[in-house]
Image (cartoon, helix red, strand yellow):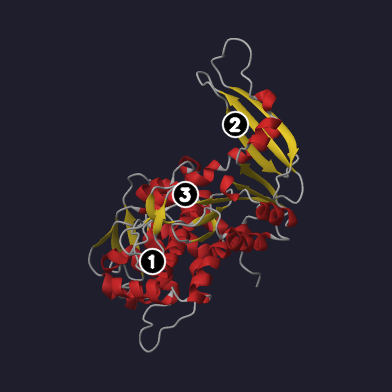
Amino acid sequence: MADPRGEALRLDFDRRLLLQFRGSLITSDAGLLAYRELEDTFGLTDTGAERLADARTGKNGRHRLAGLLRQSVFGRLAGYEDVNDADRLCRDPAMRWVVGDRAVIGTAASASQMGRFETKWLSRAENLSALADLLGQWIDKVHQRRPPRMIVLDMDSSESPTYGEQEGSAYNGHFGCTCYHPLFVFNQFGDVERCALRPGNVHSADGWRAVLESVVARYRRIVKRLYFRGDAAFANPEMYEFLETEGIGYTIRLPANSVLQSRIGHLLKRPVGRPPNEVRRFYASFSYQAQSWNKPRRVVAKVDWHPGELYPRVGFIVTNLARPAKHVVAFYNQRGTAEQWIKEGKNAIKWTRLSCRSFAANAVRLQLHALAYNLGNFMRTLAMPKAAESWSLTSLREKLIKIGAKVVSHGRYVTFQMAEVAVPKQMFREILSLIARLRAPSAPT
C-alpha cells in the first residue's frame, strides 16, 4: 500500500520476515511494484495459476505456480526477455516482492527452475491451451470493471526471426528471413485478445478460424457491436461468411483485379487541367461478386492522384457496413494501429525472442510475452496520469519500471525509497491512486 506522505511504497509483513532484508539493498526495477498493485487489483496471475495443471511431484513445489507465472510475466515486462537473468533477478528485492510468498524471505526462482517451468511444465498441451485462453480472461476481468460499448478486432501476422535448428522455423519470402510466423488479434485498446505461433512458411491467414472463433465466442451476447478489420491476406469467402453469420461488421482489403478496376474506370483517367499541388481523392461504392463468393457484396474503392505521379493509387475494401464510402475507408485505415502495437511488442517486450529448440516451448514463450504486453498496456490505458498518457510501452519501461530504489527495512514493513528522475513523487502517487479506484467495491457486511 502507498505511504500516506507519498514518499515511498511501503509493504507490511510479519516481523520474522525481516532477517533477510537487514542492511542496505538496492533495486533498479522498483517501478514493477506499481504493476504488481495493478495485477493484484484484478487478480490476474492467480486466475492463471488456477487453470494451470501442476505436474510437479515430491519437494519440487518450493514456489507456487502463481509466483512462477508472475516472475515470468514481470521479468519480460522489465525487459528480461528470457530466463538467462533469473539467477540475478531471484535476489532482486523488487522481484521478490512481486513474486511474493516464500520469495519474500528467501529468493525467487532460479534460472534452472524458470527454465523447467517454461519449457517443461507450461509446454504440456493442457497448460499451453490454458495460457492461450488466459489473454482473453485477463481482458474480461478488466472489462468487468470498465465495460466497453463496442469491440473492434484487428487481425494481423508478423515475423519472429529464428537462428539455428529451431523446430518449425522456415524461410518466408515475404519477410525475407528464416522465421516463425505468429498471428495476432488486437482490440481497439491495443490489448492482445489472442495469438498463435505458426511455422515460418505458412500463409498469413493460416489458422485464422481457430484464433478468431474463440475471441468472438467470448463477446457473443455480451457486446452488441462487434467489428473486424483485416488486410488482403484475410480476403477469402470463408472469412466473410463466418463474420456475416456472427453478425460482425467488417472491412477487409480486397486485392485488385481487372474486373474491379473496370468498375471504376471513370476514376482512373487523369483529371483534366494542370495537376494540383495537393492529393486528389475520389471514392466509389458498388456491388461485386467474385466466382468463389456465394452472393454479391459491397466493395468500396478509393483512388488517390498524387502530385508528380503518373498513375493513381487504387485500393479496394469489401465490407458489409452501410456507412458512406469515405467513412468506410477511414474506419479501415485505423487498422494501421495494429502494426504499431506489433512494433511495440517487438521493441518493448521483445516477443520475437523465441530461442528454444522445440516449437511448443517457443509457443509458450510467445504467450508469456503477450501476457506481459497486456499487463503493460493495462497500465498505460487504465492507470496513467494525463501527463504520461502518450508514453509508449518502451517509455514506460525506461521511465517507470526502471526506477532505482533503496530498500530500508523497519519493524513490520519494508520501504522502497524511489529516486525521482523521470517519474516524480506526485506522478507515482497519482498512478497508485488510479489503480486504487479500479479495485472492486468491498462486499457489504
| Residue at 55%, 67% in the rendered image | 133
Q: Position of residue 96 (x, y in %)?
A: 34, 68
Name the element at disc 2: strand
| Residue at 66%, 25% in the rendered image | 282
Gap in angstroms between the C-alphas marked 1 and 3: 23 Å
Q: How many marks?
A: 3
Indicate left or right for 353 with 154 as reference.
left
432 to 280, vertically: above or below: below
Identity, as a three-letter code, of the amino acid under mark 2 = Val
**Residue toward you, 165 or 39:** 165
Identity, as a three-letter code, of the amino acid under mark 1 = Glu
- Which numbered disc, 1 or 3, marks the residue closer to the eye? 1
Q: Residues within 10 Å of mark 3 (few under 14, many from 20)?
A: many
The residue wearing badge 3 is 342
Quadrant location of residue 404?
Answer: bottom left
Of pointers 1 and 3, the one earlier in the residue sequence:
1
Gap in angstroms between the C-alphas marked 3 and 2: 26 Å
Gap in angstroms between the C-alphas marked 1 and 2: 40 Å
Name the element at disc 3: helix
The residue wearing badge 1 is 167
| Residue at 64%, 35% in the rendered image | 258
Q: Position of residue 163 (x, y in %)?
A: 32, 58
Residue 314 tag number? 2
**Residue toward you, 437 or 80:** 80
Q: Position of residue 230 (x, y in %)?
A: 59, 47
Identity, as a three-letter code, of the amino acid under mark 3 = Ile
| Residue at 49%, 65% in the rendered image | 40
Of pointers 3 and 2, the one earlier in the residue sequence:
2
